[in-house]
Image: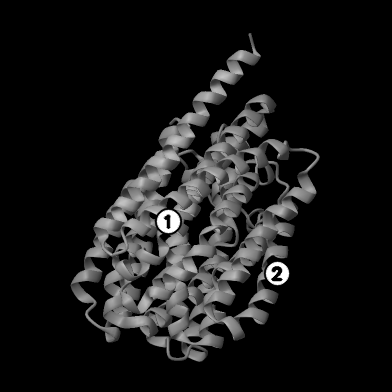
């Protein structure tokens, strides 16, 4: 299947995976309030940590390893079998540890955590890494979309108050398990499980563990933020942060979707030694991503203060204030994602990924410890900004002599300038439409799209003309 089709399917999959919980967010916010949202956020964040341990970096390592072995069916079957056996061992041990947490450690969130157990069970049969390594994205997208739609319907039907938070947890964890089972069924006929010696499975443990360090480091400043805000500032502040971060997380799904499609393709290209094609792909991806994230970042910053109270309710007005600085993490996430998925991981230079995200995690923990006590949820936002900025900076320090960073920064500057102009125009238009309503928000959003789109089209046309002139 072509890269464009895979990207389209994966964007759809990521969009629905995050977008449907976002659809239910306004209903949940009004039904359970800030404390309810914060309590669920705490339970889910801890559950997510256990899921990351259960998968042990396979979402990167598995994709890359399968992509490199897919031309040889015998090697592919053996590779898949060895990795899955390792996954069953690690995920099984993690599931036991999860039960220990629920019954011995969990506090007020215990009922919610117990009904999130299927999240950990789903790690036993999460085989998306194999499908993606084989460049098969359609089954993942279609089947998970169906499951998520059914889950969203259940939320509206059965969650009526704070006492029903356990239902919300069960619905989403069950949908995760069902989606994984349905996607795994798509592997029939494409790969075959053949028992291999335990030592052959365990040889994958080391490389996976290296990537797991970086996965956990990323989790420190993307999930543990919520734990720290909840512990230090209270569940209500965490509810505000959760709803602000949820919008940014939804938008970042577009970035990771493109990276997920490109990683197996680039891994295969590196295996074949196609250097010119690799450089062309990376350059095009970088410009595309920076164009997208600049539009998202400046667009969210322009309308966040109106969007939050309309979408989540008046109690979550401050979430809009948090969204403004948090939106600019999208630019840093996009830049770092291209380097990670198209340069670092396909070349098996995992140590660069580990160093960059561990530095980001360290910066985040220090910033959170210093800033959350006085600034509460805004302290977590500033810590996240500092962490996300650290990752591409560390990548640059290591790779600056190998990659054309000057060209990449030029793209960033151009699209950020367009984004700044769009933000200014939307803010100016907002003075003419002072009332808070969905109609006014829609008008401002459309104005932003027209301004940013017009600037991009003008630039692309001028750049193409200039390129022709230079090559006469």
Q: Earlier in the sequence, mark 2 or mark 1?
A: 2
Residue 23 on image: x %, y %: 30, 62
Viewer-side residue, 89 vs 5: 5
Viewer-side residue, 199 vs 188: 188
Residue annotated with mark 1: 427
Q: Residues within 10 Å of mark 1 (few under 14, many from 20)?
A: some
Secondary structure under badge 1? Answer: helix
Residue 66 located left or right of residue 112: right
Residue annotated with mark 2: 363
From this view, report whether residue 415 is shown above or below residue 114: above
Q: Is residue 157 visible?
A: yes
Outermost residue toward the top in this view: 472
Q: Is residue 193 visible?
A: no
Which residue lies at the image location 33% right of the left edge and 71% below the top edge? 309
Residue 403 on image: x %, y %: 73, 38
> Mark 1 and mark 2 in contact (Cβ < 8 Å)?
no
Which residue lies at the image location 47% right of the left edge and 89% below the top edge? 103
Secondary structure under badge 2? Answer: helix
In which quadrant will I find the N terminus? top left
Nearest-to-viewer mark from 2 and 1: 1
């Amino acid at each position: 299947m072509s890269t464009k089709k895979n990207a389209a399917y994966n964007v759809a999959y990521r969009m629905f995976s995050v977008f449907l919980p976002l659809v239910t967010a306004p209903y949940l916010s009004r039904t359970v309030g800030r404390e309810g949202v914060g309590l669920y956020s705490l339970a889910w964040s801890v559950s997510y940590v256990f899921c990351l341990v259960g998968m042990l970096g396979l979402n990167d390592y598995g994709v890359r390893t399968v992509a490199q072995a897919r031309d040889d069916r015998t090697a592919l079957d053996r590779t898949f079998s060895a990795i899955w056996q390792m996954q069953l061992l690690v995920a099984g041990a993690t599931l036991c540890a999860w039960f220990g947490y629920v019954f011995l450690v969990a506090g007020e969130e215990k009922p919610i955590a117990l009904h999130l157990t299927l999240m950990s069970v789903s790690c036993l049969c999460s085989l998306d890494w194999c499908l993606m390594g084989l460049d098969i994205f359609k089954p993942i997208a279609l089947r998970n979309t169906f499951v998520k739609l059914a889950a969203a319907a259940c939320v509206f039907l059965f969650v009526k108050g704070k006492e029903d938070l356990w239902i919300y947890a069960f619905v989403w964890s069950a949908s995760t398990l069902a989606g994984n089972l349905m996607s795994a069924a798509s592997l029939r006929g494409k790969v075959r499980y053949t028992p291999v010696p335990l030592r052959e499975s365990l040889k994958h443990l080391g490389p996976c563990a290296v990537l797991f360090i970086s996965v956990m480091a990323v989790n420190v400043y993307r999930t543990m933020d919520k734990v720290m805000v909840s512990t230090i500032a209270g569940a209500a502040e965490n509810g505000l942060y959760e709803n602000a971060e949820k919008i940014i997380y939804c938008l970042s799904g577009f970035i990771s979707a493109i990276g997920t499609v490109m990683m197996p393709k680039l891994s295969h290209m590196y295996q074949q030694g196609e250097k010119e094609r690799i450089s062309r792909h990376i350059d095009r991806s970088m410009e595309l991503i920076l164009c997208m994230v600049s539009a998202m970042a400046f667009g969210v910053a322009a309308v966040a203060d109106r969007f939050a109270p309309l979408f989540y309710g008046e109690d979550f007005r401050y979430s809009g204030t948090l969204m403004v600085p948090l939106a600019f993490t999208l630019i840093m996430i996009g830049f770092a994602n291209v380097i990670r998925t198209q340069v670092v991981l396909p070349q098996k230079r995992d140590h660069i990924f580990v160093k960059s995200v561990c530095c980001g995690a360290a910066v985040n923990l220090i910033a959170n410890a210093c800033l959350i006590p006085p600034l509460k949820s805004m302290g977590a936002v500033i810590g996240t900004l500092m962490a996300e900025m650290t990752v591409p900076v560390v990548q640059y320090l290591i790779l600056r002599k190998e990659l054309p960073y000057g060209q990449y920064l030029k793209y960033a500057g151009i699209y950020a300038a367009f984004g700044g102009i769009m933000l200014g125009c939307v803010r100016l238009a907002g003075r003419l439409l002072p009332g808070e309503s969905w109609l006014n928000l829609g008008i401002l959003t459309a104005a932003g799209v027209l301004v940013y789109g017009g600037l991009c089209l003008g630039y692309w046309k001028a750049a193409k003309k200039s390129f022709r002139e230079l090559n006469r």
